Amino acid sequence: MSLAKILWVDDEMESLQSQKLFLENKGYEVKTLTNGYDALDYVKENIVDVVLLDETMPGITGLETLARIKEINQQLPVVLITKNETENLMDDAIGSQISDYLIKPVNPNQVLLSLKKIIDNHNGNIACDFYNRRLVAEKTTSAYQQEFRNLFMALNSNPNYNEWMELYKKLVYWELEMEKSDSPEMREVFQSQKSEANTEFFKFISRNYASWVNPKSTDAPIMSHTLFRYKILPHIEKGKPLFVALIDNLRYDQWKSIQPAFAETFRIQEEETFYSILPTATQYCRNAIFAGMMPVDIEKHFPAQWKNDEEEGGKNLFEEEFLKAQLKRLYKGDIKYSYTKVVNHQDGQKLVDNIHNLLQNDINIIVYNFVDMLSHARTEMEVLKELASDETSYRSITASWFEHSPLHQALKKIADKPLTLIVATDHGSVRVKTPYKVIGDKQTTSNLRYKHGRNLNYEQKDVLAFRDPKEAGLPVPSVNSSFIFAKGDGYLCYPNNYNYYSNYYNNTFQHGGISIEEMIVPVIRMTNK
C-alpha cells in the first residue's frame, strides 16, 4: 500500500521523470498528466490525496485548474509549482486555498518535504494523521496533568480579584485544550477542578462583594457600573471613532470561540475581563453599565425609568437615556454618539446598511441581543438542547452565529478605517445541574439563579443572601424584601411541582447567580490593522 496517491500535472513532465521515480521509491503512487483538462477529469473519477500543479501550462493555467479542482473537491490539498514569484500570483494562489507552493526549479527533497507536511496535516484517511492527532491528545493530557497541581495550589492560596481573573483565563484555556484530548477521564478531572473553582469563588464573592459595591470602597475590581469610566471613555479620541459592541450574555470561553473571526480584520490590543454585578441578569448589569451606577442609585436618580422584576414593562428601555446622562457626567467636552440596539435580523441588516454613517461619531454603542436569546431558546426548544448539549457545542454555535451575523458583516465593512473597537458583555451564563429548594410568598420572583421577596426560606449553604438589598447596591422592591443568589451550578426551585421543574431546567444555561462563568466576563479592545 502506497503512502499516498499523488497527481502531478506539468506540461514538461518528461523532464521530471527522475523526480517521479524518487517519490515512487519513497512509497508514493504518482500519476502524471500534462494539462489541466485531463487533471480535472482525473480528479472527478479517481481518489487523489495531493495534487502537484504547474502554474504555467497551455490550455488552462494552473490557477484556473486550481479553482476548478476546489469546485470538485474543496478539501483536496494542492501544491502550486511556479517560476513566477510575483505578489499578485501568490495572493491569488493563497486565496484559492493552496496548501503549499514551490519555486522552480524544484529538487526532489523539496517536493518530499512538502508532501510529508501536507499529508501529515490534511489527509484524514492516512494513518499518520491519526497518529498526529493522538500525539496532540497525549501531549494535551500530559500538559494538563502537570498543570493540575499548579491550578489546585492557586485555588487554595486565597486569590484576590485580579488573581481570580487570571485563574479563570487559565481554566478556559485548559477547557479549550481538553477538546483536543481523547481522554474522557481527564475531561472529567478537569470538570471536577472547575467545579471546585466555583465552590471557592462563591466563598470569595460572599466575603468581598458587599465591600466592593460600598460607595466608600477604595479597593474593588472594575465592575459593570465602572466599566464605562475605566475601559471605554479613556479610548474616545477625536477624529478616530470608537465602536463598542456589547454582546449580551457572552462568556469568556465564547469570546475565545469568536476571537479568530475578529483577528482576521482587527488587531487585538488588550484582552481583559471585568466583574459583572449581582444579579448577573440583563436588567441589572446592562443598566448599570450604561448608567455608570449601581441599581439602587439608578432607581434613586431615574425613578420613572427603573422597574423592578415584578413590575410590568420592559426593563431595558432607557439604556440610551442612561448613557446620555453618564456621558454628560463623566466626559468633559462635546461628544457625538450613537446608540443602536439589534434584537432581530432586520435590525442587524439596518446596521450593516448604516455602519459607514456612524464613522462621523466619536462613540457608537451597538447592543446585540443574540447569545442571550440563544441561551433562553435552548431552554425551551428540544432541538437546540440537542444542538448545544454542552459547553463545546454551545461555543460552536456561538462561533457559527457570529461568522454569519450582520454584526460581523457590519464590522468588516469598516475594518479598513482608523478606529477603535471594544467588545464587551453584560454577564455570562452557567450550565445548571443542582436544584435547590426555596420557599417564598406570591411576590417572590421566578428567576432560577436569584430571587427576591419576603419570607424566603432556603438552605444557607446553597445561596448568598442579602437581608438588606442596599448592602448589595440593589433597590428594595418591598418592605422586608431580601435577595438570594445561587452558587455554582445550582438553580432555585419551589416545592410545588419540584420534580417537574428540576428536570425541565436541569442542564440548561442560566444566569443571575454566582459563578466564574457568569461574573468574570470579557472586555476586549481592538484597532484596525
Image (tube, helix red, strand yellow):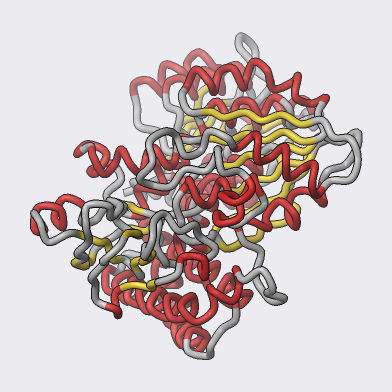
Q: Is residue 16 visible?
A: no
Q: Nearer the viewer, residue 362 or 188?
A: 362
| Quarter residue 458 falls in | bottom left
Using residue 383 as the reference point, say whether residue 116 is left or right of it.
right
Q: Outermost residue toward the top?
A: 59
Q: Is residue 470 above or below residue 18?
A: below
Q: Outermost residue toward the front?
A: 479
- What residue appears at the point 23 percent right and 70 percent down from the top-left corner? 457
- What residue appears at the point 60 percent right and 81 percent down from the top-left corner? 160
Q: Position of residue 168 (x, y in %)?
A: 52, 69
Using residue 453 as the reference point, say whether residue 259 is left or right of it.
right
Q: Is residue 154 above or below residue 243?
A: below
Q: Quadrant of the C terminus?
A: top right
| Quarter residue 320 falls in | top right
Q: Nearer the viewer, residue 89 or 529?
A: 529
Q: Is residue 406 above or below residue 60?
A: below
Using residue 153 as the reference point, say whether residue 324 is left or right of it.
right
Q: Position of residue 3 (x, y in %)?
A: 40, 50
Q: Nearer the viewer, residue 48 or 366?
A: 366
Q: Position of residue 441 (x, y in %)?
A: 21, 58
Q: Nearer the viewer, residue 158 or 65?
A: 158
- What residue appears at the point 39 percent right and 62 percent down from the top-left corner? 513
Q: Is residue 292 visible?
A: yes
Using residue 194 as the reference point, say whether residue 459 is left or right of it.
left
- What residue appears at the point 77 percent right and 38 percent down from the top-left corner? 242
| Count of all numbered marks drawn on residues in the image | 0
